[in-house]
Amino acid sequence: MLTDLQSVYGTLLEASLLQEINQVGTYRQLRAGTEIIRPGEYIKSIPLLISGAIKVIREYDDGEELLLYYVEEGNTCSMSLACCTEQKRSTIKAVTEIDTLLIVIPNQKLEEWIGRYPRWRSFIFASYQNRLEEMLSSLEKVAFERLDERLVEYLKEKGRINGENSIHQTHKEIADELHSSRVVISRLLKKLENLGHIKLHRNYIELNDL
Amino acid sequence: MLTDLQSVYGTLLEASLLQEINQVGTYRQLRAGTEIIRPGEYIKSIPLLISGAIKVIREYDDGEELLLYYVEEGNTCSMSLACCTEQKRSTIKAVTEIDTLLIVIPNQKLEEWIGRYPRWRSFIFASYQNRLEEMLSSLEKVAFERLDERLVEYLKEKGRINGENSIHQTHKEIADELHSSRVVISRLLKKLENLGHIKLHRNYIELNDL
DNA sequence: CCTTATTAGTAACCTATGTTACATTATCTT
DNA sequence: AAGATAATGTAACATAGGTTACTAATAAGG
């Protein structure tokens, strides 16, 4: 486990800090589709990703949702950071996109290390920076791009994260994450198929050239 | 000047830190409409707002733009923080919305104080947290709300920030900040006028009940 | 005071996206 | 195998919002 940690965070963090993380943290191996954070929960610890990916979703009472961004290996979820340090309830949902290995750190350590380890401090700042940029990028996509463009990017990203050239999702699920409707997504997917970019099947989509 | 600083940041930051800020920082009194940050610039210092307000805008090569959020007194601009610590170019434009007093801190102090002043550390974290939330809120508005709702919120917020019940902007300017077109904004404003919520004039809009 | 530029009003039209409704096909249960 | 359920295809229609074009009103400059 420590070797995994070192191979991912070795260049980012101090060797002594890695030892400490390994001692106080709890390793968790999670299956794809596991809910890590639910809206309304208090968060008492932060996850460092060793492998896999987590998708972060904004969810509403009425069942509406919107995909915000993915967190990948070597990163942490700044939304949790923020919630930790401020003792606030989470406003987002986090779900493992694929099988994921992470290590969970209790939040008092988070603060303590900021005083003691300069590289931890940089790491935390960089995480915030990344998150702000991801949010900005999501905002731009929603504000400026048309749905067909967003759909293509969604398919590409999902394929990349899952390391496959196919997407195992129903049209309804895609529609939810893009905050659209099933019929519209089916229509656009069919158009992409007619252009030869993808091939549609029941419950999965083959990606050819996007 | 120090008394202004104390009255705004006195409860947030250590007294000794305020002294230090007062010494190393540069006070700047800016007129409404002053550009503080332009896209592409490197940022070597961060601003602490003492009074006034700054609007933060995403701007593109083709002249398109989108209003992201306002920074008000007692806050700093986390987008600058992020740029400072990472030595990156700014991706946003910041303009004073009204006459504004702020104090500018060189960025090496920013880092130094994080190690030395716990409350500075909390302040910086809280700023990030606020910015993430503002971004999330902007994202939601663009993704879920219709333009007429966004327009109403825009008018309210602008009125509040300027401390007036009128907005001194042309329809074109409003359209740009909401990333829409003049004709559409005029149409929606006229509808709001017919409902008795506002009164339209050349170059300004009277707000009645919104 | 007259000309010009800026700002706003309005109509006609277009398109992306959402909605409703129903048919079809694939998968699961029993 | 039959029926139930879930996923997809498709057509018809509604609407928010963007575009173009033109007019009207107001302000600014000489």
Image: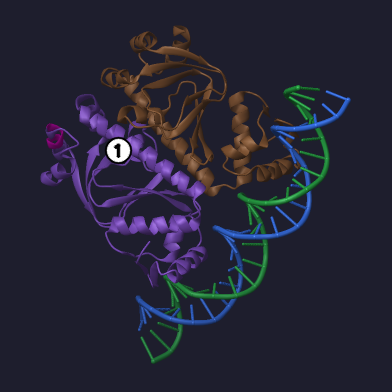
Chain colours: A purple, B brown, C blue, D green
Percent coordinates x, y for residue A155 in the rendering: 38, 59
Magenta span: helix, strand or loop, mainly?
helix
Percent coordinates x, y for residue A124 in the rendering: 28, 33
Residue A136 falls in image quadrant = top left
The residue at 66%/24% (across/down) is B164
- Residues A182 and A29: in front is A182
Image quarter (top left, top right, bottom left or bottom right) of the C terminus of chain A = bottom left
Query: Is residue B144 highlighted in magenta?
Result: no
Left or right of residue C6: residue B79:
left
The residue at 53%/45% (across/down) is B142
Q: Residues within 10 Å of mark 1 (few under 14, many from 20)?
A: some
- Residues B167 and C23: in front is B167
Residue A91 visible in the picture: no
- Residues B39 and A71: in front is B39
The residue at 13%/38% (across/down) is A23
Q: Give the labeled residue for mark 1.
A: A44
Q: Of the residues shown, which amino acid type is indicated by label 1?
A: Lys
Residue B70 visible in the picture: yes
A190 lies above or below B93: below
Residue B114 falls in image quadrant = top left
The magenta segment is A16-20
D30 lies above or below D25: above
Helix, strand, or loop for circle 1?
A: loop
Percent coordinates x, y for residue B72 in the rendering: 50, 24
The subunit carrying tag 1 is A
A155 lies above or below C5: below
The residue at 28%/51% (across/down) is A53
Percent coordinates x, y for residue B65 in the rendering: 53, 39
Left or right of residue A80: residue A102:
left
B98 lies above or below D12: above
Left or right of residue B144: residue A82:
left
